[in-house]
Image: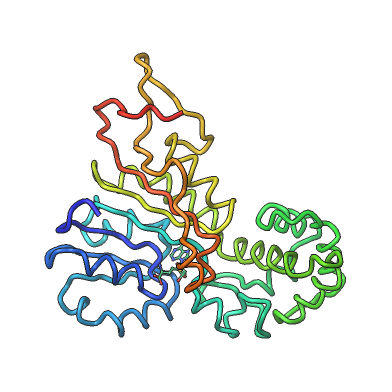
Amino acid sequence: MTDPSGIYVDGTLGGGGHTEALLSVLAPEGRVLAIDRDDDALAEAARRLAPALEAGRLVLIKGNFADAPQLLAERDIHQVQGLLLDLGVSSHQFDAPARGFSHRFDGPLDMRMDASMGEDAAALVNRLDIGDLIRVLSRFGEEPKAPRLAHAIAAARPIGTTAALADVVEAAAPRGQESKTLARVFQALRIAVNDELESLDRILDAAPRLVATGGRIAVISYHSLEDRRVKRILRTGNREGSLHRDLYGNAITPWEDLTRKPIVASEAEIQANPRSRSARLRVAQRRNDTEPSARHPD
Ligand SMILES: C[S@@+](CC[C@H](N)C(=O)[O-])C[C@H]1O[C@@H](n2cnc3c(N)ncnc32)[C@H](O)[C@@H]1O
């Protein structure tokens, strides 16, 4: 946090833990705008963080964080001191069988973060042709046996529940690889249903205009598809990840990367919260466009 009286965006409100932590270190006039596309998350935060809401220190917004520039502009806010993203699915979403995110519980094959919108995972799995199913599994799940699994899934259609999908995947997975395969297939479908990588790309592109000079972006990712994107943009300012320099050798990038190596959870934190094991935190500071980079990252 760079300015205790500033405006901060938590793009992934979830259970509200980060928003609450931000509010606890901000001055009374500092504000948090917290976005989520999940109505349950917003309702729970409205209940739990009611005092901050009533004091006008917290604003809750239903929407996609990729639309943050417009969502904030509607509230007459054009720049902020910080943007925080804690990507993926919340523990609440993951542990609620009715949301269909986890192969550990039986429930409808839904997986939509915004349960009021779009096609759910069952509709997607039952609609895609084999080629697209293979592409989803290999692109979003980095699944080495994507063709074999896609054929098995197609042969079992229609599939309507997490348990039905898990049965097919387990039967088609190489022996001993059942759990990893299940995790990859469920991850792939979840990313496809929620357009997760596209949302991430859009907010990373928009962030240099949204975050004021001297302000920061902090992103926590949970798998390499996300972390690769975040790393490239925060190091080089572009999706390709190749650093451009001006005539004087200064890096042309809006960001000063503050974490050359991602910050990972301590053993104690992993003990307390096993899902933090795969978390990777990267932070960058918005540079002044008119000043050369101090660090010349490569
Ligand atoms: C890992 S959880 C965040 C947990 C939160 N930091 C906390 O302290 O409890 C991710 C949350 O972000 C939401 N989310 C994920 N992608 C989103 C997007 N593109 N737009 C808005 N919300 C999103 C999910 O619905 C979920 O509630």
Q: Nearer the viewer, residue 14 or 180?
A: 180
Q: Give the vertical position of 257 relative to 54 (above or below).
A: above
Q: Give the vertical position of 50 relative to 247 (above or below).
A: below
Tell me: 54 left or right of 190: left
Q: Residue at x 69, y 63 (%)?
A: 184
Q: Say which quadrant the N terminus sits in.
A: bottom left
Ligand 1 rendered quadrant? bottom left
Q: Quadrant of residue 54?
A: bottom left
Looking at the picture, how far across and down is residue 213, in whole percent?
A: 24, 41
Q: How does the figure colour the protein chain or chains?
A: rainbow
Q: Residue at x 82, y 63 (%)?
A: 149
Q: Residue at x 22, y 56 (%)?
A: 77
Looking at the picture, how far across and down is residue 270, in whole percent?
A: 50, 67
Q: Give the vertical position of 40 relative to 181 (above or below).
A: below
Give the total of numbered labels. 0
Looking at the picture, how far across and down is residue 113, in whole percent?
A: 51, 72
Q: Give the vertical position of 79 relative to 90 (above or below).
A: above
Q: Quadrant of residue 163?
A: bottom right
Most extreme residue toward the top, as rendered?
A: 247
Looking at the picture, how far across and down is residue 48, in whole percent?
A: 30, 83
Q: Nearer the viewer, residue 271 or 240?
A: 271
Q: Residue at x 56, y 64 (%)?
A: 194
